[in-house]
Image (cartoon, helix red, strand yellow):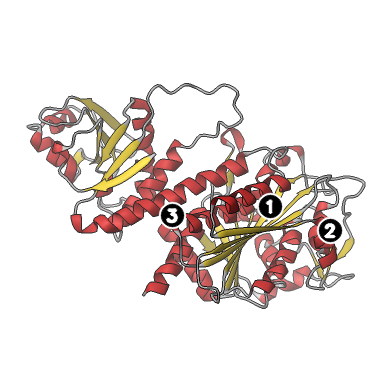
Amino acid sequence: MEFSVKSGTPEKQRSSCLVAGVFEGRKLSQPAQTLDKASDGYLSSLLRRGDLEGKLGQYLLLHDVPHVLADRVLLIGCGKERTLNDQQYRQIIQKSTKILAETGAMEATSYLTDLPLKQRQSDWKVKQAVEATLDALYQFTALKSKKDPVKRVLKRIIWNISSRRDLNACELAVTQGRAVGNNVEWAKNLANLPANICTPDYLAEQAEALAAQYSSVSVSVLGQKQMEEMGMGAFLAVAQGSSRAAKLIVAHYHGGANNQEPIALVGKGITFDSGGLSLKPAANMMSMKYDMCGAASVLATLKVAAELKLPLNVISLMACAENMPSGNASRPDDVVKSLSGLTIEIANTDAEGRLVLCDTLTYCERFNPCVVIDVATLTGSCVVALGQHASGLLSNHSPLANDLLVAGEYSGDRAWQMPLWDDYQSQLDSPVADICNVGGPEAGVITAACFLSRFTKKYNWAHLDVAGSAFRTGKDARATGRPVPLLSQYLINVCNKQKS
């Protein structure tokens, strides 16, 4: 898919399709008004007949509009002009993309980037339009033996901007939006694969392929024997019930100076989570191939950094294992020793994510990171608390938490901060070990983060619980690719701060 930006009046554009907005009350957007004037009131006459009210999601496809050079004009309902917000803007872009894909137009010129949005500049609108378009066109067909033939494919969209002065910023926005959107798709493809294909070994192969593609990326993989020698007893306790060996995959992106402290991204990579001997109910097991979405997202974010050649050092660590029941599996009430030296009582084998993460977070210390951000589909409690719309955020460093919240708002991949108070730590007390791996039914998101915080005292750290945001269940079961947009924007913002 090709994207570009230009500045020009709509009636003079030779295009398969022009796209413009109409607000509620049949009010034409500024580009649509220009088209209407050029066509001697053709558009407004149709609206007066009631063909389009302008409500969000409505559309009207016109052919051969008088005195307009484009073959088609697509009018998209944009809702109320005064209350148009970021989320609605993305919905409008996605709706227009799906309609364009159905019309047979191979290219289009869109004036939706001219829609007025409070506190949003042209570059933001272009970047979001690129990402929303790629998201709307995404399909997972890799495992289909027969694919539906597409006669004509939408190949190119030109986004119009009102001022030529914004061209450079908007061209950069296209580059960034394409990198983020393509790697959101890459993360989705990894996560949507079934667990018999996407194994710890498979994820290691994907990381190594990335290193072969980019000279700025290097990869090392710690196997089970190495982890045993190091003393990663918590990590290995999760994997011991599976016939597939655990892997700790460490990918380095070298974009900054040699002495620049790296940003470490840690991802939970449980390629299938049966719950272990604390077996999940059958209905809850159907979507557990998605328990590696954290690992997919941190590797995809590193790929964004490599594509954009960001002047940063980034390390993505993926804690990969299967959590399966067998005669070798960990039992409830087992006690294991973590890499940090802390002993852990395993009260529930289905609280396995924090076990692979705690050893990985300790392993992070050797890289002297400036910050560490872990990403995990960690608790069902996060879904109960925040649903599918926001990721849970907890941190031991307020500036880092604020930076992630800002990146989430800008990217539309939002997070919501929850408390990490010492008051909750006592719920993790164990009568037989230093700490228990579960804190009871109350405040599950927080106690899970409290557990991880015991292993992050030597650096600034944030935890993103993406159990509700990383994938959807039911008939529309699919990975979302989150929080790749948030993490990518965070890295871009760090680079912008370095420049200023």
Locate residue 102, reporting x and y percent. 37, 27
Please tell me how crowded label 3 is: few (under 14), some (14-19), or many (20+) other residues with Cα within 10 Å.
some
In the image, what residue type sits under mark 2?
Lys
Measured Cα–Cα span from mark 2 to mark 1:
19 Å
Tag 2's secondary structure? helix
In the image, what residue type sits under mark 3?
Gly
Rendered position, 139 above or below 214: above
Rendered position, 396 above or below 318: below
Observer-nearest of 41 and 230: 230
Q: Which is nearer the N-term, disc 3 or disc 2?
A: 2
The reply, left or right, for residue 459 in relation to residue 12 is right
Tag 3's secondary structure? loop
Observer-nearest of 411 and 423: 411
Q: Quadrant of the N terminus?
A: top left
Measured Cα–Cα span from mark 3 to mark 1:
24 Å
The reply, left or right, for residue 455 in relation to residue 260 is right
Q: Quadrant of the C terminus?
A: bottom left
Residue positioned most to the right? 327
Locate residue 99, reporting x and y percent. 35, 31
Circle 3 or circle 1, nearest the eye: 1
Q: Which is nearer the N-term, disc 3 or disc 1?
A: 1
Measured Cα–Cα span from mark 3 to mark 2:
42 Å
Q: Which is nearer the N-term, disc 2 or disc 1?
A: 2
Locate residue 336, reporting x and y percent. 86, 64
Residue at 26% in and 28% down: 61
Residue located beneath label 1 in the image:
269
The reply, left or right, for residue 38 in relation to residue 182 is left
Residue at 49% in and 70% down: 402
Residue located beneath label 2 in the image:
225
Locate residue 38, reporting x and y percent. 9, 35
In the rendering, which numbered label is found on residue 412?
A: 3
Please tell me how crowded label 1 is: few (under 14), some (14-19), or many (20+) other residues with Cα within 10 Å.
many
